[in-house]
Image (cartoon, helix red, strand yellow):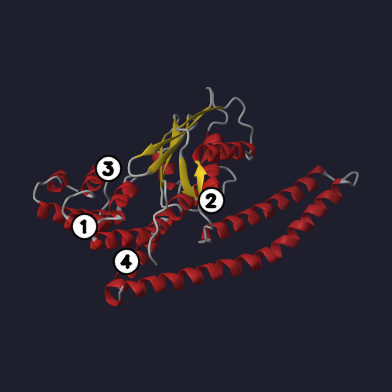
Amino acid sequence: MADSEEQALLADLDSDDWASVQDAVEVTGDWLRTRRVDEPLRSRIAERLLRLAAHPKWEVRKAVAHALLFLRHESFHAAIARIVEDENSWVREAARKTLQRRTELTRADINGTDRDDAVLGMLTDLEARFGARARRLALKIADHLHLQFVRAAYHEIIRIIAPLDASLMNLEREIGDIPGVPVRSLTHVHRAHQRVKLLTEILDNLREFATEATGEFTDEEVLAVLKEADELARSSADLPAAGLVVRYDVDAGLKVEANRSRLLQALINIMANAIEACLGLDRQAELTISASPQPDSHVLITIADNGCGMGDEALRDCVQLYSTGKPGGMGFGLPLAKKFIETDHQGTLSIHSRKGEGTTVSVILPVEQIRTED
């Protein structure tokens, strides 16, 4: 991507001529959908789209609503919040469609495969030929078949694993009481039992990942949820985080509308990773948890550790399903957190990390959930 092209596009987005701005916003949407836009340019584009969401011309605001669909940046929700209740009905409709389709895009982004992008393209073609209702029906049918398959597979596999787990548990206990049984034999049985338990956990996580229902949303105090997540993450850590210093910087009285159990699970997964990253440091291990209000009725939560950090490849892969760099890891923790934050709570999860220095996870949540029409 030539620098001259980038500068020309940014200049058009800053133009005083609203028609030129509208054209530039439409080009921006095409770039975000079809090109590999690097992080610095994406940030500059996001800054302009956020500003243009309040442009005096409705034609520009409508173009922004369309362009935002493929914007992978934490400014997305602040920008969409400005236009989802726009005074112009066409702008409102475009913004609401973007929110609906964003859920599809988030799922594809989590799974991270070209196949998912192809599915999005097919859905777009379907809508172009037969209308938005056909797209929605296709999604509902696909979701229904997918969930039906996951449930059926789960029950069939767990039907075999459950008695196997019980048998291994009994065998481990019984041979442990027999004098003279070789330690090696006990070790093999124990290992087999642990692996069956691991399989069960993988199945449970897969079922949770595929579940679409999120239950009730209630007003939750951010500090209370963060402290509960911190306590549970530390109690469930495989190794004790001895000497870990946890600091809080949370604005009192902050609340968000959330499904408590899913938000809690997302935060536990993030904090558990942060705690594990601090194990075995040759310096004081520190975890900083903060939360503060943001413009356009959002809340920013950051969870920062000074642990081992990640390189570029690990950072790119850490939210991909089944990808893990931890011994014995299953690759569900951060992908599940991303799903709960972005798909279920219309939020944004972003990660910044430097190998050997630490990791910061930033979560932006709307104070109130934006309702979209079916």
Residue under numbered circle 2: 262
Tag 1: residue type? Answer: Ala
Give residue 63's mark.
Answer: 1
Residues tagged 4 and 2 counted as in contact (Cβ below 8 A):
no
Tag 2: residue type? Answer: Arg
Q: Earlier in the sequence, mark 2 or mark 3?
A: 3
Q: Earlier in the sequence, mark 1 or mark 3?
A: 3
Q: Please, what secondary structure does the residue beneath circle 4 have?
A: helix
Tag 3: residue type? Answer: Ser
Q: Residue at x 71, y 48 (%)?
A: 191
Q: Please, what secondary structure does the residue beneath circle 2 have?
A: helix
Tag 4: residue type? Answer: Gly
Residue under numbered circle 4: 121
Q: For this rendering, which residue is in front, 121 or 164? A: 121
Q: Earlier in the sequence, mark 3 or mark 4?
A: 3
Residues tagged 1 and 3 counted as in contact (Cβ below 8 A):
no
* Image position, residue 307 (x, y; %): 50, 31
Q: Please, what secondary structure does the residue beneath circle 1 have?
A: helix
Residue reaching furthest top?
283
* Image position, residue 278 (x, y; %): 54, 31
The residues bearing labels 1 and 3 have C-alpha atoms spaced at a distance of: 18 Å
